[in-house]
Image: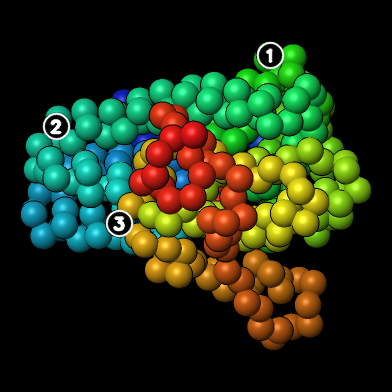
Amino acid sequence: MYTIDWIDGAVVLVDQTRLPAEEVYLRLETVDALVEAIQRLRVRGAPAIGVAGALGVALAAKQFERAEERAQAVQTLALARPTAVNLARGVHRVAALLPSFDAVLAEALRVRDEEIASSKGMARLGADLVERLCGPNPTLLTHCNTGGLATVVDGTALAVVFELHRRGALGGVVASETRPLLQGARLTTWELRNRGIPHRLAVDSAGPFLMARGQVDAVILGADRICANGDVVNKIGSYAHALGARAAGIPFICVAPESTVDLGTASGADVEIEDRGSEEVAGTTAPAGTEAINPAFDVTPAELVTAVVTDKRTFSGRADGPSL
Ligand code: MRU
């Protein structure tokens, strides 16, 4: 079962807010229900929401007869979350084929299938790179969740981890919790456990210290957008790990499909960073009424990124530069 798919006329996805306690699949038949799922992070991760957006246009084609209603649905889907380029890209690619439901669905399924193929390419190229940079059996720190749950199956950075494990070339994994929604603690540990991969969980702020102590050999994580200058926009906390990696002199590797590379955005300064409001951070822990600042993503400047691995190439610096 894929993380997200089109089954019998509806979008079916695993509700990630209920993991790891329960594995519940939702059947979504309306654009509104899908937008709610994207905004509540029932489906999340840049490639997965790209597929969600694409399949959402198929829902719109089915649900609405009038062109204005469809256009409104397309707009709502594209804007459901602002930071990962995959969402708006997936929506607009497929929406170009409206009003034909058959053409829209076929293109949306192509988006899904391309992401499945991409994961395989990233796994191979990323594992080759880690073996080259780190030698045998490294311990890798990863942040957020970049596994099958963030894509359709297998993942981005975590697909590299799975491939290294398959090759017998992985020491272990440190999963960074990923405050405030705990994608690392809830989802990455769940995926690693399901695959029998040795791992330990760490609070986000332990990352740079573990690197300084020599307990981590490289950082490997995903991206929500890779800008033309090579800046990496990813889950909040990534930048701190990059600074830690630079201070410790270890590689900082970003793994993302070509669908996350955005040559139309010059640098991270041009990216809208989603702020998810006070409640997720202040919640029940701070005194009532405490206001939080809650950027969901940050920008790691290109000069802190050792290499970006996509499904097709490995590069360092500008995203339109040569492959390594
Ligand atoms: O807010 P999320 O959980 O959707 O954020 C996801 C991330 O930041 C991932 O690291 C990124 O999308 C890469 S996943 C393949």
Q: Position of residue 242 (x, y in %)?
A: 68, 55
Quarter holding residue 157: top right
Q: Can residue 231 be seen by looking at this rendering?
A: yes
Q: Amino acid at mark 1?
A: Arg
In the picture, measured across the screen, residue 267 lies left or right of residue 178, that is left
Q: Are marks 2 and 3 in contact (CB under 8 Å)?
A: no
Q: Amino acid at mark 2?
A: Ala
Determine the residue positioned at 74% across, 44% down: 250
Tag 1 secondary structure: loop
Q: Position of residue 161 (x, y in %)?
A: 66, 28
In the picture, measured across the screen, residue 2 lies left or right of residue 67, that is right
Q: Can residue 224 be seen by looking at this rendering?
A: no
- In the image, residue 321 above or below residue 303: above
Residue extending farthest to the right is: 213
Residue holding disc 2: 103
Quarter holding residue 307: top right
Q: Are marks 2 and 1 in contact (CB under 8 Å)?
A: no
The answer for how far apart the CA atoms under marks 2 and 1 are is 40 Å
